[in-house]
Amino acid sequence: MVEKNAAPGPGPGGPPPIPPKPPFPMGYNGKMLRVNLTTKTITNETLSEEVCRKYLGGAGFVAYFLYKELKPGIDPLGPENKLVFALGPITGMVLPGAARNSIGAKSPLSKGIAKAESGGFWRAELKRAGYDGVIVEGKADKPVYLWVHDGEASIRDASHLWGKETAETEAAIRAELGDEHIHLAMIGPAGENMVRYACIMEGCHDAAGRGGVGAVMGSKNLKAIAARGHNLPGVVDADKIKEVRQQLNHPFPISMFGTGGPDMLHGEQTGDLPVRNFRDSAFPEVAQIHGGVLKDTIRIGMEGCFACPIRCKKVVKLEAPYKIEPAYGGPEYETLASLGSNCGVGDLQAICKGNERCNAYSLDTISTGAVISFAMECYENGLITKKDTGGLELKFGSAEAMLKAIDLLAKREGIGDLLAEGTARMAQKLGKGSEAYAMNTKGLEFGMHEPRIGPLLATSYFVSPTGADHCHAEPDGMMANPFIFGQFHSHGWQTALGPNDLTPAKVAIFKMLECYNIIKDSVAVCHFPGLSFEQMSQLVNGAVGWDTGVPELLRIGERIITTMRLFNMREGMSEADDAMPKRFYGPTTDGALAKLKIDPKAYERMRKYYYTIMGWDSRGVPLPEKVEELGIN
């Protein structure tokens, strides 16, 4: 309980009266919904102000609850795992980029921590329904869905929904509950079949993609969480929030093409675009698959998230040669690269069909494309044969093979049962040197950006607690931009660093960037509005009424990352898992990176320095003093 305010000071000449303290929580609902599917019990749990201030929400809540509540060594696909849906203090506000949330669990890919973020409309409904998150425990004895609305929740039968794709599921639940404005977090057949990189779709084209959270949802026989609400918690200082909103009231160039516009041409020229499982670098067919071509051919519109003016989401429609439903949106950059260049596929229509199938099945398009490209390289090297594939020619460049593989792995049919395991487990089962082609860190497949050209990005792939997540840091080229680098001036860096620099200063900036990004995922705000640290602190203070400054945000970020590190080490991870596939220590076969490779000695030196500035020992173990200092229980 919050203590009452101190009495005002004495009369004239005494200290000024202490201003009234607003009741906690503001910005928060102050409640988590806990659902045990085994016992069929639902409880409301009060959040403490201490936990909210130490972890904020979103990714912070994911780290806090999983580290606090999960027993070491549990099976990620067993009933002991927990699925945490977590909002932030600004989730659901009428503000660019505020329609975000984080979902976490013990990962079926890495057996470490998984977290995945998404935009859309579902989290705004959950916030208005009276909750800051949902913790799902146990396993239902038959398929169910959860219905949450205006402070009430119930578990409902979903046997009739099991096996349905996401658009069918959404339509059926809305009809059953009689409200077209209900929004869902749900899985399709890939989640039901526990494909280890299945995602959770929040709507039909917004994916909480990474780490296999959809497989965890399927393991619990939970088909969906439907949400509808009408009451947003109040804020302390609406003027502070309005000020930030006005600062963001300008055109956003990304609204023209979304991600993966004509800049993909530049990505191929500089080597950032992954080609044929990160083996190659030249891909002239990029001129046929980027977002500019999409805009001029089969794109029918652009959409955005709840209350956000940034229209970053493509919508495509096609009747032939493939029928593509616009309900499933269109491919973003990561999908254009993963199902396109990384599989050697230059057929834009086939890539769009692959994107539709992934969203219908609830598949992470990044891992899906990476798994298929890995299988294609294994096939070309004789480690997978036609006998294994049932006659399917898994060759680089085959759009037919890419699309057929998506269907097979989502249903775990034939060779798809192996593909559904992810690249790390596939390599373990195949052996024969196949691990050289498995592009993952900590079991999580690489985001579609080349680490050979980016020390910042490569460092993030090394040490990110969730694996090779491209959103853990910023691209090096951005940090070389004097305008973008300006936000670091007040932190002591005045000169922008070169894109290929690998120095202690860049490692220190990386630490700040990963804190910055984990705070965005905890406040729960999108990357696209480009909020500064100062703007994020202003939003938190305006919503909740604290006096949080940039130093506190950085400290919170460090606390969350260290908590995730502790979780992973408790699950058996070590510094040996902070490693890159050997492929990146050599150049590509052609193109822009034919003479460029990662220097392992330089990265080893910088990795050790990163451990030092994080307060970890030389093996990457957080020091007891650092854990105590950060207040991690």
Image (cartoon, helix red, strand yellow):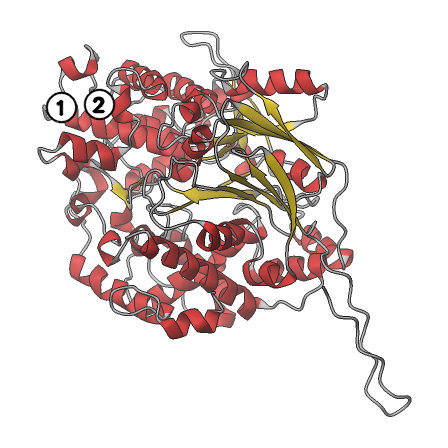
Q: Earlier in the sequence, mark 1 or mark 2?
A: 1
- Foreground mark, 1 or 2, reads 1
Left/right placement of residue 321 relative to residue 387 reads right
Left/right placement of residue 226 relative to residue 336 reads right
Residue 51 at x, y percent in the picture: 58, 60
Residue 310 at x, y percent in the picture: 60, 39
Rounded to the nearest angstrom, the CA distance separating label 1 from label 2 is: 8 Å
- For the residue pair 262 and 275, the one nearer the viewer reads as 275
**Quarter assignment of residue 395:** top left
Residue wearing tag 1:
380
Q: Amino acid at mark 1?
A: Glu
**Res 477 seen here:** yes
- For the residue pair 313 and 371, the one nearer the viewer reads as 371
Residue at the far front: name it: 39
Q: Residues within 10 Å of mark 2 (few under 14, many from 20)?
A: many
Q: Residue at x 49, y 21 (%)?
A: 296
Residue wearing tag 2:
396
Q: Amino acid at mark 2?
A: Phe
**Quarter assignment of residue 177:** top right
Residue 465 at x, y percent in the picture: 36, 52
Image quadrant occupied by the N terminus: bottom right
